[in-house]
Image (cartoon, rainbow, N blue to C red):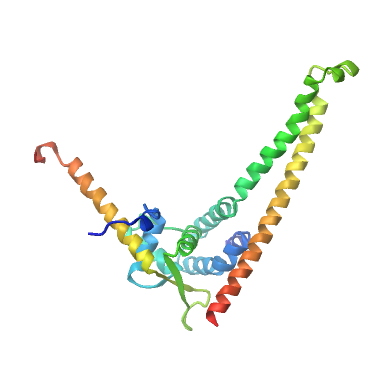
Amino acid sequence: MRPLYCVLVRMHPSSFRSEFGDQMISIFDEITAMCRGGAALCLDAAISLVRQWLFRTGLLWKALVSIAVAGFIFALPLRLPRGRPWVAAQEPVSQFPLEDLIKITLVAFGFISIILVATVSWSHALHRRRASAQRHVRCARWK
Amino acid sequence: MLSATPELERFLPLGQAALYILLALAGEERHGYGIMLEAASQSHGKYKPGPGTLYDNLRKLIEQGMIEASRRAEPDEDPRRRYYRITALGRRVLAADVERLEAVVREAKARLRPAGARTF
């Protein structure tokens, strides 16, 4: 169980991990040395992981906004041909344009994935910078 | 009798985890595992926060200025341990929340008293 717990702790945002990661593993070692409970602690770490990334880094809102924006951008062309009679005059629109729908869905998913990856890496970099700044402040206090 | 100032009111009511953490630290400074054990003891085993919940709340309380990291572990202890202590603000917030809870208990006792025992 310990390797799994360490992986879960390592997956936390860097600012949280650098501050509390070692302490969490220390508590895990202390509890599992005395009694069982590794599974419950792993579950707690997994919940903490989701909580830290989604709610404490603001990733949830960024992801929701990204999806909403991407959805809006890609939903727009789907509706436009109906309002442009000359498109219908040139090429008749089929009753159910499944192929177009699949293509647009794939492009939309690609676009959303790119935005999500960019958001995660941006958020990760931001937290690394913040953790580094906090370390500098702490060092300055100790001095 | 204390009354919560607007400065304290924005922290109230305290969540369950925050309340037990502040209570655990009210007596003495403790490390994370010590806080977990004290919270379990104070709640008679009914509330046992895991490390993830504990440190999430500790971080929030540190950011709010209610607790602070005090010292590293003693040489004979696990070097990864870190001790935390309650600040003056934390103590005032805890006192205000306890006062709020006392008022709730008083009110509840008055309302839940058997009908025959009521004094009008």
The percent coordinates of residue A17 (x first, y second) are 59, 64
Picture coordinates of residue A41 (x, y %)?
51, 58
Q: Nearer the viewer, residue A87 or B37?
A: A87
Q: Is residue A127 visible?
A: yes
- Quadrant of the rendered structure where residue B37 is? bottom left
Using residue A60 as the reference point, say whether residue B116 is left or right of it. left
Q: As displayed, is residue A85 above or below residue A102? A: above
Q: Could you tell me which residue is drawn at 82 percent across and 27 percent down?
A: A99
Q: Is residue A98 left or right of residue B1?
A: right
Q: Is residue B10 left or right of residue A58?
A: left
Q: Looking at the image, which residue is at 46% across and 59% down?
A: B57
Query: In which quadrant is the N terminus of chain B drawn?
Result: bottom left
Horizontal and vertical percent position of residue A8: 60, 59
Q: Residue furthest front?
A: B6
Above or below, B57 against A84 in this view is below
- Residue pictured at 63% horizontal, 59% vertical: A11
- Furthest residue in direction right, as rendered: A90
Residue A137, horizontal then vertical, whole percent = 57, 73
Q: Which residue lies at the image location 37% right of the left edge and 60% below the top edge?
A: B20
Q: Is residue A100 left or right of residue A5?
A: right
| Whether residue B38 is visible | no
Q: How many numbered callouts?
A: 0
Quadrant placement of the C terminus of chain B: top left
